Image (cartoon, grey):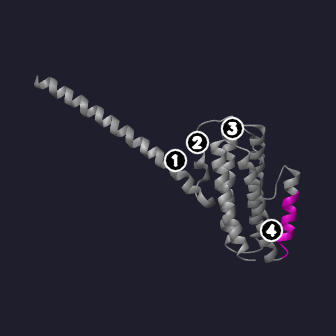
Amino acid sequence: MYQWRTKQMTKFLFLSFLILISFSLSAQNCGQKNNSNKNCKGGKGNCVQAIDTIKYDLSSIERDGLIYMRLEEKLARDVYLTLGKTYKQKMFVKIPESEQRHMDAVKALLDKYGIADPVTEDEIGSFTNADFKKLYDDLIEKGQTSFKDAMLVGKEIEEMDIKDLDERIEQTNNPDIKSVYENLKRGSENHLRAFTRHL
């Protein structure tokens, strides 16, 4: 009888241990998911963490939107890096780093849904899309005129980015795309404030 009770108690303790471990892992995963948006808030941290593992159906508009935003984030990064060679302000180091994280987040979505990356050569000022290439050239020409003009260029880019992100957010019900876009928008709003402070 004693041995039987001992075995039953051992089984009970073992099952209790498994249940405890299960709850601990669930709580940990939940915390990580909640922290993903926090880590990327304002364009800081790893924005890729906002992407979950579930594959949702995408419309052609959503696919085109991801391609477009990948290019637009590259445009912002490339313009700021180029202007940073002329103007040595810290913002032309920090903001391009943020834009790179934005690029990485959109690239992760492209990879997740098997969409070809429009950035085939990740060189500064290199665009396969003629419209983005022309826009890059025009913005650089304008921004190199004076520091104030560089700030106006930054303001123009971030206002354009916010407008486009607002449109893309309205066009999707996909939770991971929406989450990434909202994080990118917060980053652009921070960048916009940084540029307007100098005007």
- Callout 2 amino acid: Asp
Disc 4 target residue: 153
**Residue ID at (16%, 28%):** 6
Tell me, yes or no, whether the highlighted magenta stretch contains residue 142.
Answer: yes
Disc 2 to disc 4, how far (Cα)?
34 Å
Q: Which residue is mark 3?
A: 113
Q: CA distance from mark 3 to mark 1?
A: 20 Å
Whether the residues at callouts 2 and 1 have beta carbons within 8 Å, the answer is: yes
Q: Residue at x 59, y 48 (%)?
A: 50
What residue is rendered at 66% in x and 39% in y? 112
Q: Are marks 4 and 3 in contact (CB under 8 Å)?
A: no
Q: Please give the residue where the numbered disc 1 appears in the rendered image.
A: 33
Q: For marks 4 and 3, give the CA distance.
A: 33 Å
Q: Is residue 167 visible?
A: yes
Give whichever of discs 2 and 3 has the lower sequence position: 2
The range drawn in magenta is 134-145
Q: Dot 4, crowdedness within 10 Å: few (<14), some or many (≥20)? A: many
Position of residue 15 in the picture relative to residue 177 (left or right): left
Q: Mark 2 or mark 1: name the one nearer the start of the chain.
A: 1
Q: Residue at x 65, y 53 (%)?
A: 182
Q: Which mark is residue 74?
A: none
Q: Amino acid at mark 1?
A: Lys
Badge 4 marks a residue whose secondary structure is helix
Query: Could you tell me which secondary element the residue under label 3 belongs to?
Result: loop
